[in-house]
Image (tube, rainbow, N blue to C red):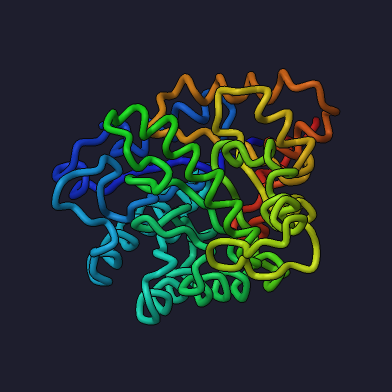
Amino acid sequence: MTIDVHGHLSPPESLRRYPMPRSLGDADAMIETKLAAGVDLTIIGSPVGGGAMVPLPGVDNYAQTEEELARFHDWLGDLVARHPDHLRAYVYVNPFGGDAHLAAVRARLADDGFAGLIANSSVAGRYLDHPDAADFFALAAETGAPVLLHAPAAPAAGTGLADLMAVEQLGRFADVTIGLACCVLGGWLERHPRLRLIGQGAGGALALLAEKLDRAWSPEHWQRDRGPRPGPATPPLPRPPSAYLHRLWVDTATPSAAAVELALRVFGPDKVLYGTDSPPLPGGSVTEGLRLVDGLGIPETDRQAVREGNARALFGARLPPPAPAPSRA
């Protein structure tokens, strides 16, 4: 069995209102394509709720009302209920959404079919090291719900990029990198031992930056010169930031085998999850992703962990049980 922890589907209302790939509206085709490739279960969600992933003038994804989000989650829950063996879903959450929003998120997490949370790596230009995200992280830790940190439609790291493809392939990649780093530097993993964060796309470039994180935590050039350190102080951590990287999960939704190999080494073979970002990426990305995982020079036990075991360990009873092995006559 293979579990895909990173897929998307959008409701008919969003497909009518906003430009987006039509594949996001065809759950049956997604399931059939993945089953044909050997992927049995997909955890789906939307990083914009019922909004638009393409930045559009006058469209503010963070201005969705609780009623609008409730309709979106009702649709998502109904979709999972129609395909209980092949789908689970993420609850969309705005980390800065306030008490009423977080209460609605908590209630939705109790519904059958919802396996975790999906949140943006930056929100309207703010990263999640901001103190206003404290209640969100406390909720995620208390419930034990895994959080897929996904780049937003308009990433803070994409500021100044005019071309949509540059935003999509570069700005969002950089946003996940910085967003995860801010979660570490902000002390959320230190404060919440039960916090479970998943970085999309192998965690961006974070696996390359362990030493840079430690320099951000302890800047030798400022200490040596004894000059005043500019900017707001980073919350103190008792250990170097690199010591927290093994607490993060990442998915394989990247075309780079080198990125996945580095993720296995830095985060650990028990922290890498098979993911495709399909839809919207076409069905071919599913087989390409499986070939990437199968081509890694790792033990077969680690390969099976990436394909299924790590997701089961992370999401636990929120996932349907594996199908029983066929009996031998």
Place of residue 89 in the rendered image (x, y in percent of width and height, measured from the top left): 46, 54
Task: Give the total of numbered labels.
Answer: 0
Instruction: Give residue 229's position: percent from left, percent from top.
Output: 62, 62
The residue drawn where x is 44% and y is 32% is 170
Vertically, is 120 above or below 68? Answer: above
Res 274 quadrant in image:
top right
Relative to 85, is 255 above or below?
above
Q: Residue at x 24, y 64 (%)?
A: 64
Residue visible at 63% across and 65% down in the picture: 228
Q: Residue at x 58, y 25 (%)?
A: 289
Horizontal arrangement in the rendering, residue 139 relative to residue 1 (left or right): left
181 and 86: which is toward the camera: 181
Front residue of 163/250: it is 163
Foreground: 265 or 71? 265
Q: Is residue 312 at all visible to an observer of this figure?
A: no
Asked whether, in this view, residue 52 is left or right of residue 16, the answer is right
Q: Is residue 62 left or right of residue 247?
A: left
Q: Quadrant of the C terminus?
A: top right
Q: Position of residue 146 (x, y in %)?
A: 59, 59
Quadrant the N terminus occupies: top right
Residue 96 picture quarter: bottom left
Q: Is residue 246 above or below residue 206?
A: below
Q: Is residue 148 at least partly visible in the picture?
A: yes
Residue 175 placement (x, y as % from top left)? 47, 44
